[in-house]
Amino acid sequence: MRMQFKRIVCATDFSDFSNRTVNYGIKLAKEFGSKIYVCHVIDLSSVAIYGEFQLDPVGLQNRVMQDASEQLEELIGKQHKEWEPLITVGHAADEISRIVEEKDIDLVVAATHGRSGLKRLILGSVTERLMRTLTCPLLVVHSLDKEFISPDDQELKIENILVGCDFSPDSGLAFEYGLSLAQEFQSELHLAHVIEAPIYQELHKTETPIEEELQQEIHNRLLQKLQDMVPEEARNWCTPQTSLLDGRPYEELVKYAEQHKIGIIVLGTRGHGLVKSLFVGSTTDRVVRRAPCPVLSVSTKVQNG
């Protein structure tokens, strides 16, 4: 099933870093024939530190919104025709989630501070909240080191895609997005499952030949399970690289992404079952913060509501 991104929201606070979300949105929109909504959320709690807000709150809000409108116009320029500015007042996560519902958005592109120390648009708690509340995928951009877009008008290119798989419904949906993107961009698809020590701890205490044989059998079954995720009709063009990683999930996935020059990581936001803690909460957030490339997070609530 081809995943479509027909309506894309790019969130920016006008910092140089968060403005990069617009570049991603424009390149993706050209690829998918999408409409872009460029969103700026005005947080009046920060505006209120100025005395003028108390004297003329309506006037100040209007001036801030007018300034935001002019900056959005300048930011987009003539790069993309199908776009609409969205300027709202409130808390970033709440407003973005509301816009997603109202506009039936297919993808949100946002920035986080990552390792650079930026403190404005989408900081940790807001990103984490978006991952839990959005009813559409969230593409988080946070690194300047490795990007799948170029500043010029060259074709959008994603050479390697990594999907983290714990066999939960959310990671299954992540695989569907990863497979669709791999077909769209003719990318190499990497599927990785992390064997986390606290969960598979008995596998690390083996000593007898029988126990070693059992451990190898489990490894083989997990690798086969990764292979079986690829539908028959996709096998004509897709031969994914499957890997079992051993350690802390977020560390191993980030390390794998660095070693294999991954262009985008696709993760489910909620995991359960055999590896019940693989992509829950802090793990997904840690991957987003540390990954050397953009991260696309998805949830089955996109489909199930």
Image: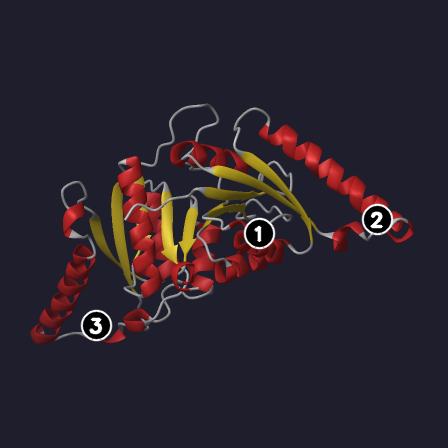
Q: Name the residue under label 3.
A: 203
Q: Earlier in the sequence, mark 3 or mark 2?
A: 2
What kind of residue is marked 1? Ile
Q: Please name the residue shown 36% across and 65% down the image.
A: 278
Element at label 2:
helix
Residue 142 image offset from top left, x and y in percent: 50, 44
User: Is any part of residue 229 visible from this angle?
Assistant: yes
Point out the tag, 3 or 1, that comes first from the N-terminus.
1
Whole-percent x and y of residue 8? Answer: 49, 43
**Residue marked by disc 1:** 99
| Element carrying mark 1 | helix
Residue 170, given in percent of the width and then of the height, sits at 35, 62
Disc 1 crowd rating (10 Å Cα; few below 14, some 14-19, many 20+) is some
Q: Quadrant of residue 222?
A: bottom left
How far apart are the two marked residues, 3 and 2, measured between alpha carbons? Answer: 64 Å
Label 2 Cα neighbours within 10 Å, binned few <14 / some 14-19 / many ≥20: few
Tell whether label 1 touches label 3 (CB within 8 Å): no
